[in-house]
Amino acid sequence: MNEIPIGILLIILAVLILLSAFFSGSETALMSLNRYRLKHLANEGHRGARLAKRLLRRPDRLLGLILLGNNFVNIVAASIATLIALRLYGETGIAIATGLLTLVILIFAEVTPKTLAAIKPEKVAFVAAYIYTPLLKILYPLIWLINIIANQLLALVGVHAADGRNDQLNADEFRAVVNEAKRFIPGKHTDMLLRVLDLEKASVEDIMIPRNDITGIDLHDEWADIEYQITHSQRTRVPVFQDNIDNTIGMLHLRKMLNLFARDELNIDSLKAQIQKAYFIPEGTLLTQQLLNFQKKKRRSGLVVDEYGSIQGLVTLEDILEEIVGQFTTDSQTRSFGIHPQKDGSYLADGSTHIRDINRSLQWSLPTTGPKTLNGLILEHMEMIPKPGTSLMIEGYPIEVIRTSNNAVQSAKIQPRAPQYGKEDLDEPDIDDELDIDNENTEN
């Protein structure tokens, strides 16, 4: 070794540093690969991606190979650097070689290649995969021995390398992936994907037509009234009942009734012959499950019932689809939800309007964990039936009751949240104090 010229030793040292840079950079690149893009490229037939995917199936073997090579070249490089230092400066050169080699390896064999690999992982990883695949086969016995020892040590703490990485995504992680992909996916498509995920957080009560707003056919009504409902109803399917909605007999497809009406064959007997068995939905059913239930049972609508069998509302397939694609029956989304913009910047909302619809259409954040409608939210907050003109504040949103009827709020005016209200200001004051403040503001 002493007979080798210093120039040759410097060249060998430079090559070893380059090899160390390759091992360090390829390790970062392979571990930084986007697993889903890697699968896509592998399925498309990209050879580098297929080789990288195969290597990553057993990361313990891959890391064993990389670290074996990296440590080997680093140790040899340290030995050669020491030899050069001894020949140039004697024993004093050992300290100089140690400090200088540490700095060189840190910059040129660690930080720089790993940064490059983190920025361009595919370009580095796919090239490295071509080298590591045959190298792993050649060094397999040694790698196997190293992995046996390392895996036994991991097994002592309950970690098994054969389990590999868990690349499955939960709903929240998938939502984050969709948000990150907005640059590549049209905005409407992204919104639809996110709304599909949101179906798991909503139940049929969140979108159902409340019991008091259900329009149906009462068989005890006069025939002229029944005929008028059939010809003027805005819905295709309506429940048929006797006296009240809890005595529902079934559902009626009004399009078939109109055909009978056109042929002058519509009468009480032909109407009863067209009644289909009602489909009941337990309250609390998630929208994702109900969408599958509609598909399985070949239904397009159902009546929501509570634990006592009382009907709470009506849900249709169109209601669930609109949760995904948005409103498609009107050009004015806010008006379709019973929300009417006012000239002063406020909104006049029906008491039966769902809180989720208000939040979605106006980008607000009224609480949705309790009551489902604006009326229910106001009644829960006030703990009494408010009179018209009563003002209150909920989560920073000023609300004024406009009209009440039948022990319910029929309409209310809502102002956008005041800018000074942050999350720290959302603690609700006492109701009496709040009413005094609001009444003073109203008088002023």
Image (cartoon, helix red, strand yellow):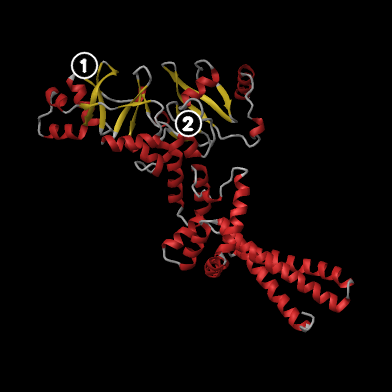
Amino acid type shown at disc 2: Ile
Answer with the quarter of the image where residue 421 lies: top right
Using the rendered image of the protein, determine whether residue 32 is visible from the camera's viewpoint. Answer: no
Q: Residue at x 50, y 30 (%)?
A: 368
Near mark 1 (Cα within 10 A), the count class, few <14, some 14-19 or many ≥20, is few
Amino acid type shown at disc 1: His
Give whichever of 282, 208 is nearer the camera.
282
Which quadrant is the N terminus positioned in?
A: bottom right
Q: Residue at x 21, y 32 (%)?
A: 254
Residue behind mark 2:
355
Residue behind mark 1:
220
Callout 1 secondary element:
loop
The CA distance from mark 1 to mark 2 is 35 Å
Give whichever of 169, 220 is nearer the camera.
169
Which quadrant is the C terminus positioned in?
A: top right
Instruction: Mark 1 or mark 2: name the one nearer the start of the chain.
Output: 1
